[in-house]
Image: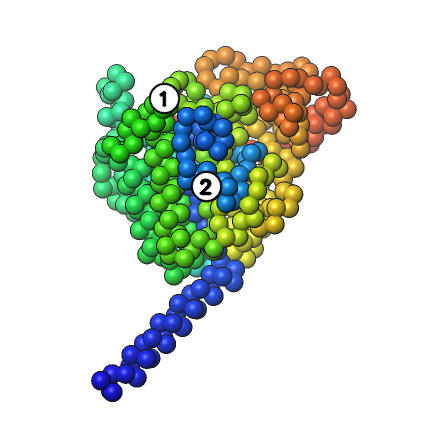
């Protein structure tokens, strides 16, 4: 026993030193980052954002303990360009990740996210972060466009939306649809057209395992749920539970998933040093009616240049977050510079970014540096928000063949007074309209649009 005692003491001291060193390593300037990204979740789909029958106790708790952002925007009102904007911090016109004919990527799209783009995951590698993408990717299915080749150390998920499935398309009469919904582990396909009722719970468990396995390292987890995009599914434990029907069941299971992630962080003493951001890729898919979500008091939804297409629910939570409601503008475009700022990484200087750091807003509740927001459909700029005011230069419905309407006299709305953008007040503020029209001309003159990657077709 005497001979073993020094060895045991040495082991204890070494273990203690390792833990302390790991804690210090993370506490100094390397917080963990978790983004929980939903698909087609609307501004009005959470209890804490006003839904009367969908129960979201875990998200409500997040909103109380953290920050609830009420003017938070995505870079596009449809999936692929929105996700590209989040991960690169750049608008689609700068990256080519947009489409005018094809608004998202499909299983027959010949290209995807360019290797020349820098993702959040790539940039965080500079400070030795371990990175994971779990769930929906939708930025290209070719080898060079997949997560592992774009900065993620671990990928478990699907390259496309859950409706891009041979099995699901057959259910709605499209029996000739040739593509299967694939699940990848790293770069290897491990399942084809799986049981979608298990997706939320399966991806949640993968996310929990990633956190537990990397709790000693700084990490970035991008958990991108395929739901509540149509078709909506939930596991047996949630089916028939929500007063909102099957769509509500799906959202309530996502809320459960959030609870499991937060519980895992707390059990591993990571909550003080982890920033968790919950949001959605765009507004609700209203044409799916009861199987789609709600934009609440906002106008229109997915695919639209109105508020319901671009403004999404956002909650930020963690020990560094100063609680409260944030009514200033923020965007998923801001997450790249925010994470770099919080991880003490200098932003790349060889390209232009469209985001600003939200670090001081998150930690001190200061005013945001974001003063402008741009509403693009493809590479066409339809509207601009400056402060409280949003000016529409043109309009086109989210779906259908109705041609674009260019306004001879632009419409102006005060989104703080009129969040639905129902009451045109351009006649009250002719000088502001004139200023914003001139600003648009100058902005577009200095913003060169790359060619669309989405509109490329196979030769």
Q: Which residue is mark 1?
A: 291
| x, y percent for residue 333 | 53, 40
What is the distance, in whole Å, between disc 2 and disc 1 at their CAs?
26 Å
Q: Nearer the viewer, residue 177 or 48?
A: 48
Q: Nearer the viewer, residue 145 or 275?
A: 275
Q: Are marks 2 and 1 in contact (CB under 8 Å)?
A: no
Taking the spot 61% from the left edge, 46% from the top edge, the residue there is 365
Taking the spot 34% from the left edge, 47% from the top edge, the residue there is 207
User: Quadrant of the image for the C terminus?
Assistant: top left
| x, y percent for residue 274 | 46, 52
| x, y percent for residue 340 | 53, 52
| Left or right of 257 in this view: 275 | right
Q: Is residue 316 above or below residue 21?
A: above
Per the image, label 1 sits on a secondary structure element best described as helix
| x, y percent for residue 139 | 40, 37
Badge 1 crowding class, 10 Å Cα cut-off, few under 14, some 14 to 19, many 20 or more, is some
Badge 2 crowding class, 10 Å Cα cut-off, few under 14, some 14 to 19, many 20 or more, is few
Q: Nearer the viewer, residue 268 or 132?
A: 268
Report the disc number at residue 168: none
Taking the spot 45% from the left edge, 50% from the top edge, the residue there is 33
User: Residue 200 occupies which quadrant of the picture?
Assistant: top left
Mark 1 or mark 2, which is nearer the start of the sequence? 2
Taking the spot 28% from the left edge, 83% from the top edge, the residue there is 5
| Left or right of 187 in this view: 65 | right
User: Quadrant of the image for the N terminus?
Assistant: bottom left
Name the colouring of the figure: rainbow
User: Residue 376 occupies which quadrant of the picture?
Assistant: top right
Q: Which residue is mark 2?
A: 61
Residue 221 appearing in the image: yes
Q: Is residue 216 above or below residue 271?
A: below
Q: Residue furthest top?
A: 402
Residue 37 appearing in the image: no
């Amino acid at each position: 026993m005497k001979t073993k005692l020094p060895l045991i003491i040495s082991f204890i001291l070494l273990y203690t030193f390792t833990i302390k060193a790991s804690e210090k390593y993370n506490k100094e300037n390397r917080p963990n980052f978790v983004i929980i990204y939903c698909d087609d979740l609307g501004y009005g789909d959470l209890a804490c954002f006003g839904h009367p029958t969908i129960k979201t106790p875990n998200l409500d708790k997040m909103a109380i303990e953290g920050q609830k952002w009420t003017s938070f925007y995505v870079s596009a009102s449809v999936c692929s360009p929105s996700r590209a904007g989040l991960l690169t911090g750049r608008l689609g016109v700068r990256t080519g990740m947009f489409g005018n004919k094809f608004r998202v990527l499909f299983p027959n799209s010949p290209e995807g996210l360019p290797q020349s783009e820098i993702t959040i995951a790539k940039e965080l590698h500079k400070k030795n972060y371990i990175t994971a993408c779990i769930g929906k990717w939708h930025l290209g299915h070719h080898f060079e466009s997949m997560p592992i080749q774009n900065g993620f150390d671990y990928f478990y998920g699907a390259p496309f939306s859950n409706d891009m499935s041979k099995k699901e398309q057959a259910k709605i009469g499209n029996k000739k649809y040739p593509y299967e919904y694939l699940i990848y582990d790293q770069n290897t396909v491990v399942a084809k057209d799986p049981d979608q009722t298990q997706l939320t719970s399966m991806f949640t468990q993968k996310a929990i395992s990633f956190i537990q396995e990397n709790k000693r390292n700084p990490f970035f987890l991008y958990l991108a749920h395929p739901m509540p995009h149509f078709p909506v599914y939930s596991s047996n434990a949630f089916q028939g539970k929500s007063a909102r029907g099957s769509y509500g069941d799906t959202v309530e299971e996502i809320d459960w998933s959030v609870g499991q992630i937060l519980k895992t962080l707390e059990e591993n003493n990571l909550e003080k040093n982890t920033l968790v951001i919950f949001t959605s890729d765009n507004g609700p898919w209203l044409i799916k009616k009861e199987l789609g979500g709600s934009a609440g008091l906002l106008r229109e939804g997915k695919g639209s240049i109105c508020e319901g297409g671009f403004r999404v629910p956002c909650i930020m939570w963690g020990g560094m977050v100063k609680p409260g409601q944030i009514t200033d503008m923020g965007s998923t475009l801001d997450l790249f510079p925010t994470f770099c700022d919080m991880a003490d990484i200098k932003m790349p200087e060889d390209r232009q970014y469209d985001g600003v750091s939200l670090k001081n807003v998150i930690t001190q509740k200061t005013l945001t540096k974001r003063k402008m927001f741009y509403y693009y459909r493809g590479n066409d700029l339809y509207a601009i928000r400056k402060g409280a005011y949003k000016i529409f230069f043109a309009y086109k419905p989210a779906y259908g063949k109705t041609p674009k309407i260019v306004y001879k006299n632009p419409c102006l709305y005060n989104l703080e007074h009129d969040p639905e953008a129902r009451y045109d007040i351009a006649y009250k503020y002719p000088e502001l309209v004139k200023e914003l029209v001139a600003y648009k001309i100058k902005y577009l003159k200095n913003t060169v649009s790359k060619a669309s990657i989405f509109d490329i077709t196979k030769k």
